[in-house]
Amino acid sequence: MALYAVIPAAGIGRRMGGGLPKQYLPLAGEPLLAHSLRALLNCADIRRVAVALHPEDEWAGSLPALADPRVLRVTGGAERADSVLAGLDGLQEFAYEKDWVLVHDAARPCLAARDLQALIDAVTAVDEGGILAQPVVDTLKRAVDGRQVEATVDRHHYWRAQTPQMFRLGELRAALVDALAAGVAVTDEASAMEWAGHPVQLVEGSPANLKVTVAADLPLAEWYLRALNT
Ligand code: C5P
C-alpha cells in the first residue's frame, strides 16, 4: 500500500516559554518534532513524510531525524492549513491523487504505533477517511457569554479530534483549497473534508496522544513517552 504523510511543524507558538517554537521544545532529551516524526518513520508503509517548516526556521538543521531519506522538507504557510497544503504539494511529485496521506501535528509526540496502525487498518478496511479521536468524558456545558451556563450538552455525541488524520491526497487537497477559499474555519483536515461532504470515521485513540499546548503538558508527555517505550 502506498502511504504518505505530512507533519505541519511551521508554527511559531512560543506560549510555553523560552524563544523556542513548541515543536522544538525538549522532551526526554529530543525536540517534540523528533518524536512525532519518528512515530511516522517507524511505520514501514509510509513512503515519504513532508515536514512543513517555518521560512525562518533556525532549528531543523540540528535534527538528525530530518536527514532521513524519506523526509521531504517544505516551507510552511501562515496558518496550519497552509502548511498542510504545502506538504501535500511537495508530495505530489511522488504520490498519486488516490494515495492515502496521514497528517500528524508535530506537537503530538506520543503517538503509539498501535494507534497509528488502528487508524490505517480502519481507513483501508472500509475505504473511508478517518481520524484518531477520543470520546469526551467530562460533562459538557454550553455558555453564551463565557460566564453563565446556558445548557448541559449530551456528551455522548462529542469526541476530541486528534491526529493523525488520514484521507486520499487528491480529495484532501481539493477540500482544503475550497474550504479555505470559502472562509471555513479549518482547524483540522477533517473539518475541510466534512465541509466538502466526505464521510469521516472516528477511530478511538488514546490519551497518550496529547497535543502539547501548555507548559504542564511537557512532564505529562514525558511520562506517556516513557510508558510507550517500556
Ligand atoms: O498551534 P497548534 O497547536 O494548533 O499547531 C498544531 C501544529 O500545526 C503544530 O505542529 C504547528 O507547528 C503546526 N503549524 C504549522 N503552520 C502554522 C501554524 C501551525 O505547521 N502556520
Image: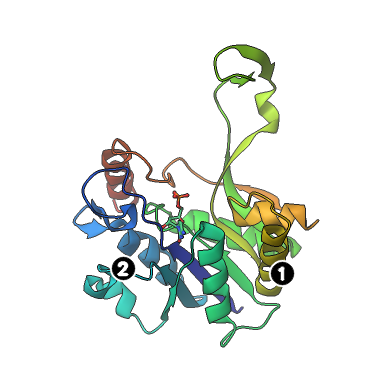
For the residues carrying marks 2 and 1, which lies nearer the camera in this image?
A: 2
Type of amino acid at the residue the image marks with label 2: Asp
- Residue 67: x and y in percent read 31, 80
Instruction: Report whether 8 appears left or right of 225.
Output: right
Q: Nearest the camera: 192 or 104? A: 192
Q: Secondary structure at mark 1?
A: helix
Which quadrant of the figure has residue 156?
A: top right
Whether disc 1's CB lies below 8 Å from ligand 1 is answered no
Instruction: Report whether 209 appears left or right of 17.
Output: right
- The furthest residue to the top: 148
For marks 2 and 1, give the CA distance: 28 Å
- Residue 226: x and y in percent read 27, 48
**Residue in the image at 21% along x and 48% along y:** 18
Q: Which residue is mark 1?
A: 174
Which quadrant of the figure has residue 96?
A: bottom right
**Residue in the image at 64% along x and 49% along y:** 185
What is the number of the mark on residue 57?
2
Which quadrant of the figure has residue 38?
A: bottom left
- Residue 108: x and y in percent read 41, 52
Instruction: Report whether 150 appears left or right of 160.
Output: right
Q: Secondary structure at mark 2?
A: loop
**Residue in the image at 36% along x and 50% along y:** 13
Type of amino acid at the residue the image marks with label 1: Ala
Q: Earlier in the sequence, mark 2 or mark 1?
A: 2
- Residue 129: x and y in percent read 69, 60
Mark 1: few/some/many CA within 10 Å (<14, 14-19, 20+): some
